[in-house]
Image: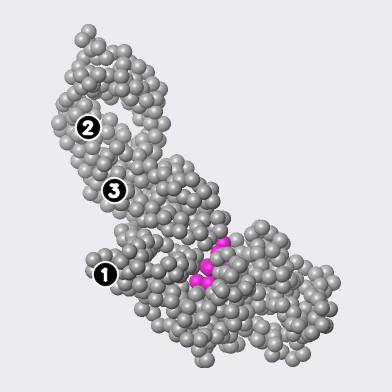
Amino acid sequence: MRLPKRLGVREVRIAFNTQNLSLALQKLHRYKPYIQQLKQLVITSKSLDTSEIKPTLMKIKDAMLKQLSVNDIDAVIAELEQGYSNGAHAINVLGQTSLLGDDNKFKDELSYIAQATDNETRTIRLQEVIGGLSEADKWPFMEALSSMAKVLVGLSGDVDESGVNELARQLLLSKGFDANTSTLAFRVLVSKLTTSSKVKHELLQTIFEGDATAERQLQQLLSSNVTSPVSDTPPVKPKSTKPLFSQVYAEFLALKITKDKLSEKMQKSYERMHIVWLALTEDKPIDTYTKQDIGLFIDRCFELPRMNISPYNKMSWKERLNVDVPDEHLQSPKSVEQYHKWLMGIFSYAKRDTIAYITTSPCYIKRNFKARIRGIFNDSELLRLLNSAKNENTPWKKWIIYLGIYTGARRGELVQLRKNDVKHDEATNRYYLLITDDHESQNLKTSNSKRIIPIHNALVDAGFIEYVEGCEDRVFAALNNVEVVTGWMPRHMASLNIAPTNELDHIRSFHSLRHTFITKCMSAPEVNINLLQQVVGHEISSFGITSNYTHKVTNIKNLIPIIDAFEV
């Protein structure tokens, strides 16, 4: 498949590693969803940064290989063992030629092959010899080769360790597995394959010696390996065989374009919605999506900015997803409803009786697509969040709640915090956060976002400083994506019986902690609004010409009263 040059990769090639047509077709069927993803990647690359495309490309490439687990090993070996008996009898029937007889004209060729020190060289030499034979000589040579195999079985005792390792690697590749030799599963496979090779060696000897009783016993042993379940292995839930969302969407889009004559304008609209879906949702089999998956996606869409106004129209999708959007710049509920209708169309296609990828659609969820306002938490709800955080065992879940409540910082600003961003001011003996984009992995919404936030005493009392001292570099090393916080918060709220909307039908999410902080600070007596704006990273309010002389304070003591005014 050819890819655009701007992606840095000229083409992608898929090797089936087989000359068996049936096996090649099976592999082609398995690769089909990934081929569809590659095609879709070409389409979306027009709207995404190249830096965002390359990791996706590598992810698709890696996904093409199945990852070997210990549970897969017995089935892989059992399938291999089924050919042992037939192979041994074939060698026995063919191998009637006397290797030392004068009439054996293949002595030199067989000697050349036998003198190889490893399986790889042996295979190369075998291919060389067969390639140089006439058609008339190939069958007699196979008889001579079988005779040599019988002799080698009689002479050899120990199993060749390097040979078993190579056999394991080739076996995995032929089955579509990633042949990573450093994994525990691969070492277990080699260990079991060594035992299997010893049984194979014994089986060959019994067949060559004509010992039918011993042969039957060994065959029964091999059969038991197939039928006997592994007693200490828990049952594994079967994986879905249905196509990925990306494959179904490609089919749906092709149908809409060819049959329904989808206009170019609507195609661009579909492309935009698909980009957002890819950014926010995991690509998985179409029948594994739940109502919760769809609901979470739609709720996240309510927090996206309008893309036809500045500065959002100049941002990349990564920046749009992380930006802090004021209420007046949010997408309209009508726009969000279009995402919902788009999804309903895709899942309705998957449900068609002629398609039958799914039996029920997960898109039937209750959402109010009218004007929505972000809400805040009341004190009772904040206390529930704090009490839960005190008893939380997962560090990032604990401290993201504490910081969200007591700093009013944006979720993206918190997730990218580094240990060096938590500092101490000697003059006031107070700790503070430096919200910055100095590190290459950090980015901020605007220049106003770069600021200092005094750390609330409640955070110090809860042990936040000790936690940071134990960090190596990033404060939240376990968080690589801000969307993890976005997805977790609604589930966490539900577990604490905190409704997603308040009594005024205002929506609540993690970002509502920031709204709550600002609202409570503004309600406190004698709070300097200008200083509050600096703490939360808003643009300093305009006071006519005097605003030219209003600058950010650099002394932390001026900002401490803002933080200390906040109480739960």
Residue type at mark 1 is: Arg
Q: Give the distance between the C-alpha atoms of the residues marked 3 and 1, in whole angstroms.
A: 25 Å
* Residue 116: quadrant of the picture: top left
Query: Which mark is first along the chain, 3 or 2?
Result: 3
* Residue 565: quadrant of the picture: bottom right
Whether tag 3 and tag 1 are in contact, CB under 8 A, the answer is no
Q: Is residue 403 left or right of residue 277?
A: right
Residue pictured at 26% horizontal, 69% vertical: 352
Circle 2 sits in a helix, a strand or a loop, which is it? Answer: helix
Residue sitting nearer the eye, 220 or 416 = 416
Q: Is residue 485 magenta?
A: yes
Dot 3 corresponds to which residue?
26
Query: Which mark is first along the chain, 2 or 1?
Result: 2
Picture layout, residue 559 above or below residue 268: below
Crowd around label 1: few <14 · some 14–19 · many ≥20 (10 Å): few
Q: Which residues are magenta?
A: 480-487
Residue sitting nearer the eye, 105 or 193 = 105
Q: Main secondary structure of the magenta part?
A: helix
Whole-percent x, y for residue 143 in the image: 21, 21
Residue 461 visible in the displayed image: no
Nearer the camera: disc 2 or disc 3: 3
Dot 2 corresponds to which residue?
87
Residue 352's label in the rendered image is: 1
Picture layout, residue 55 above or below residue 436: above
